[in-house]
Image (cartoon, helix red, strand yellow):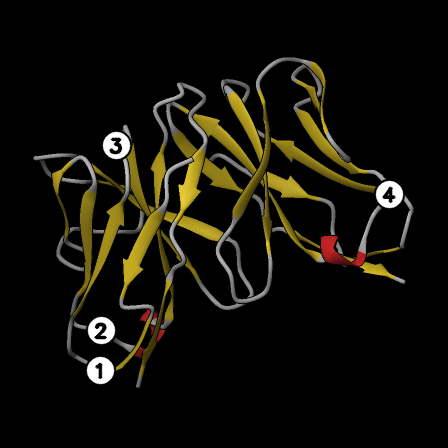
Amino acid sequence: SAVISQKPSRDICQRGTSLTIQCQVDSQVTMMFWYRQQPGQSLTLIATANQGSEATYESGFVIDKFPISRPNLTFSTLTVSNMSPEDSSIYLCSGTGTSGNNEQFFGPGTRLTVL
Amino acid sequence: QKEVEQNSGPLSVPEGAIASLNCTYSDRGSQSFFWYRQYSGKSPELIMFIYSNGDKEDGRFTAQLNKASQYVSLLIRDSQPSDSATYLCAVGSYGKLTFGQGTILTVHP
């Protein structure tokens, strides 16, 4: 399985600012994703990070709010823009291994608190 | 709207018992089915995946899939206190996963 790291692991931010979260995978993955997990809730897919092109966003998520980059096969960033307290959540990146089974492996997550 | 529903919890079982976790899904085109375990404050950890109807066993864990009934389950035999966690059912379609709301399992000594 792929080993995925994220940074920062947590942050406390002020309303109206932006935070960029980095995700690094130790081996090649075919697909990379970003999820949000709000307190006490399950995971909601934000977008699929596409290498070298614009991310594919799920309903309810837009590029202006959550710009995503994936410059190569093993690295992606998610920016949470113009933050409000409602953006307080855990943000997780995941990658799909190359086994063909489509299983996703998750990073440790970034715990974001917006004041 | 693709939906994944898990049996409401929390579920409490005694140590050594069998824990049964259930999940139904709405999208008949779903191709792959996963069970994740999530400890408090940690990220989800893959336990098992299953693609074909029937049972798949891995150690103390057995996943069961019935595509006709749109139903997938996870059985944990000889439950241990270390199995206490939230269990997430995830359903895959074209590489993307839709997660259920999770079932909290507590295994008491």
Given this view, does label 2 or label 3 mark the residue nearer the observer? 3
Q: Which residue is mark 3?
A: A28
Q: Mark number for residue A15?
A: 1
Give SS at disc 4. Answer: loop
Q: Residue at x 34, y 24 (%)?
A: A98
**Earlier-in-chain disc, 2 versus 3:** 3
**Earlier-in-chain disc, 2 versus 1:** 1
Asked if the residue at tag 3 contacts the one at tag 2, i.e. Cβ–Cβ closer than 8 Å, the answer is no
Give SS at disc 2. Answer: loop
Distance, label 3 to label 4, CA atoms, is: 36 Å
Question: Callout 1: 10 Å neighbours few (<14), some, many (20+)?
Answer: some
Q: Where's residue A102, x and y in %? A: 42, 26
Distance, label 2 to label 3, CA atoms, is: 31 Å
* Residue A10 quadrant: bottom left
Asked if the residue at tag 1 contacts the one at tag 2, i.e. Cβ–Cβ closer than 8 Å, the answer is yes
Q: Which residue is mark 4?
A: B78
* Residue A112 quadrant: bottom left
Disc 2 with disc 3 on a shared chain: yes
